[in-house]
Every structure is written in C-alpha cells, then in structure tokens.
C-alpha cells in the first residue's frame, strides 16, 4: 500500500506534467476560447496542488503519531506539548471531524467512542494516539497550524528550521513560510474569486516550493520520531533544541551522463555509476547505516524523492 509520501509525490509529478500540456497554457490574444479554458484549468490546478500539500502534511503527522503508538515509550515520557495535543488539545478537532465525516447519530456514537478510547488509552502502558490530534480542526491548514504541529514535537521557530533544511538540500532560497502563505492565498482566490487567473509561472514555482516544504517538514518530524524512539531524555524534557544541522544528508544526482552519490560531509563524489538502480540501492544502505537522509534528484535536477531509515 502506498505511503502518504508516495501519494504526494505521485500527485505532484502529475501536477508538473499537467503544466506542460498545451491545454493549460495561454495562446495568442485572439484564441479567446482556448485561453478561457486554460485559465479555468490553471485555477483548478492551484486548488488541487495546494490540497495535495495540505493532505500530505496532515496525514504524515498522523503516520508519525501511529508510529509513536507502536513504540515502547511511556506516554509520560513524550514531549509535554505532544501529550497535551493528543489529549485535551485534540477535542476541538474531534468535534469538527465528527460533524464533517458522519451523517447519522449512530455513526457519531461510534466515532466518539473510538476516539474517546484512544484518549483514555494514554493513561495505560499500551496507548493508541488519535490520528486527528494535529492539523484536523479546520477544513484548511495555515502556516500557523503547520508551525503548531512542529512545536508539539519540540521545534521552536519551525518555518525557519524548515527553510534552513531545504536550503541545505539545495532546494530553495526564499522563506518557506512565505511560499506556503502565497500558495494558500492563490488556492483561496482560485476557489472563490470567479475572475481569478492563476499565472502559469506561479504554479510551476509551486511544484518546487511544495516539494521543499514537504521534504523539510517530513525530515523534522521523522527526526523527532527517532529521538522519541531512542528515549532521548534531553529532547523529551525540552532541553535539546533540534536544528537543521542535526539532520545529516546524502545526495544522489545526475551529472554528465552518470549518477553521482555525494555525502553532505564531503564535497567529493563518494560513488559514480550509470546504473541508477544499483547506485540507489547502495546509497540507501549507506544512508541508513550513517543515519542520513538520502535526497534523490532526477536527471533534470528536480527533487524526485527522499529516504530515511
């Protein structure tokens, strides 16, 4: 079954392909009918593109909460803000989800019982955290909501950390919070303002920005999960602040007809090969062994995917 990351990358790849077809591109000023259709399609892509990013960010943190539930870490040993989020902090989100996703009184009873049992389970040694604790209290998430999700895992100044990490990956130069806010505004206008004409270049830029936001967000959450799993006391007690420099990277890039594996710690290529499958397999093994995130670019220099152990 595809993971949340795989679903997101698939949707973004089709968004990129959609922007390359003639139907989404304006023609000359006399091609009025075509240009009106292209405008409608671009507006739709602005909505769907941002929804894909929102969906990834909500479902990825749900996956992280599920993974935490499978660990042997005592609930009282989780970061304080996270414990608050999955108990009393999630009540408004559960109320919103109940009214959104259920139609009958019996369905509401079942939903409430299931989620109440999950909250109650946090008082036991075998807990099952609710997947709706973070990011599910409203129909859309804002940049403040994203920051609050990451603060629940002990990150201060989350967007700055995400930008620094994406920059270290060679992905962006602008603050990611601005990128997210601009995409959110673009989505809102495309969905609710009839005369909106979403520029092609904005959507093309969004593809890069969405990938940068997703990978940096994911890497921070996954790093926090690792610290929780290891029962890192300094982290749990809020005495350790995680920075982008704490996450080590390995890269796989295409250069001059061959695939090159490079460690963040060294400017010199570690391996070169024309066999992508072989070098990818070995790079994943090395990154896992060294506790690194493997960032894989395609042969056009675009972010393709990322791997972590």
Image (spheres, rainbow, N blue to C red):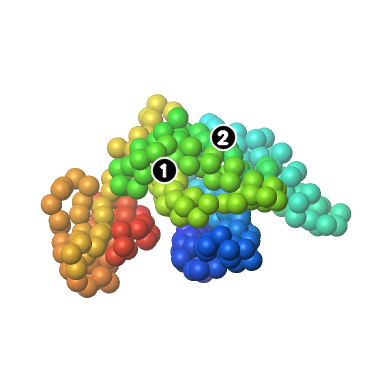
Mark number, residue 132: none
Q: Which residue is mark 2?
A: 144
Q: Is residue 55 visible?
A: no
Height in image: 16 above or below 250? below
**Tally of numbered tags:** 2
Packing grade of label 2 (10 A; few <14, some 14-19, many >=20) is few
Instruction: Name the spot of residue 190 as percent of width and height, x first.
Output: 64, 50
Hey, which quadrant is residue 148 in on the image? Answer: top right
Mark number, residue 220: 1
Q: Is residue 213 left or right of residue 75?
A: left
Sequence-earlier tag: 2 or 1: 2
Whole-angstrom CA distance, mark 2 to mark 1, is: 16 Å
Height in image: 281 above or below 45? below
In the current view of this chain or complex, which residue is farthest to the top? 239
Residue at figure coordinates x 38%, y 30% from the top left: 241
Q: Is residue 73 visible?
A: yes
Instruction: Name the spot of residue 282 as percent of width and height, x first.
Output: 23, 65
Q: Is residue 171 left or right of residue 119?
A: left
Hey, which quadrant is residue 124 in on the image? Answer: top right
Residue at figure coordinates x 15%, y 61% from the top left: 271
Nearest the camera: 257 or 123? 257
- Nearer to us of marks 2 and 1 is 2
Q: Is residue 48 left or right of residue 245?
A: right
Residue at figure coordinates x 64%, y 46% from the top left: 189
Residue at figure coordinates x 59%, y 42% from the top left: 185
Label 2: element kind:
helix
Q: Is mark 2 in CB contact (under 8 Å) with mark 1?
A: no
Nearest the camera: 291 or 68? 291
Packing grade of label 1 (10 A; few <14, some 14-19, many >=20) is many
Label 1: element kind:
helix
In the current view of this chain or complex, which residue is farthest to the left? 268
Nearest the camera: 42 or 264? 42
């Amino acid at each position: 079954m595809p993971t949340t990351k795989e679903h997101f990358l698939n949707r973004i790849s089709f968004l990129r392909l959609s922007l390359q077809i003639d139907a989404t591109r304006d023609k000359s000023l006399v091609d009025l009918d075509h240009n009106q259709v292209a405008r409608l399609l671009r507006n739709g892509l602005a909505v769907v593109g941002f929804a894909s990013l929102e969906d990834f960010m909500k479902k990825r943190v749900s996956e992280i909460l599920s993974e935490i539930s499978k660990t042997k870490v005592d609930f009282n040993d989780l970061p304080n803000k996270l414990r608050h989020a999955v108990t009393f902090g999630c009540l408004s989100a559960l109320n919103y989800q109940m009214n959104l996703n259920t139609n009958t009184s019996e369905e509401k009873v079942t939903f409430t019982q299931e989620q109440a049992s999950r909250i109650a389970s946090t008082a036991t040694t075998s807990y099952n955290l609710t997947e709706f604790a973070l990011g599910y209290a409203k129909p859309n998430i804002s940049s403040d909501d994203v920051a609050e999700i990451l603060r629940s895992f002990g990150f201060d100044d989350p967007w700055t950390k995400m930008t620094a990490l994406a920059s270290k990956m060679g992905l962006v130069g602008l603050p990611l919070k601005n990128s997210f806010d601009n995409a959110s505004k673009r989505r809102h206008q495309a969905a609710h303002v009839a005369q909106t004409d979403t520029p092609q270049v904005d959507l093309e830029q969004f593809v890069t920005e969405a990938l940068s936001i997703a990978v940096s967000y994911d890497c921070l959450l996954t790093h926090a999960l690792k610290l929780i799993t290891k029962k890192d006391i300094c982290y749990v007690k809020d005495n350790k602040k995680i920075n982008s420099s704490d996450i080590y990277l390995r890269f796989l890039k295409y250069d001059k007809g061959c695939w090159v594996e490079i460690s963040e710690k060294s400017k010199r290529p570690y391996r070169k090969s024309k066999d992508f499958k072989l070098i990818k397999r070995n790079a994943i093994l090395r990154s896992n062994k060294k506790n690194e995130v493997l960032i894989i670019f395609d042969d056009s220099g675009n972010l393709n995917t990322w791997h972590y152990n």
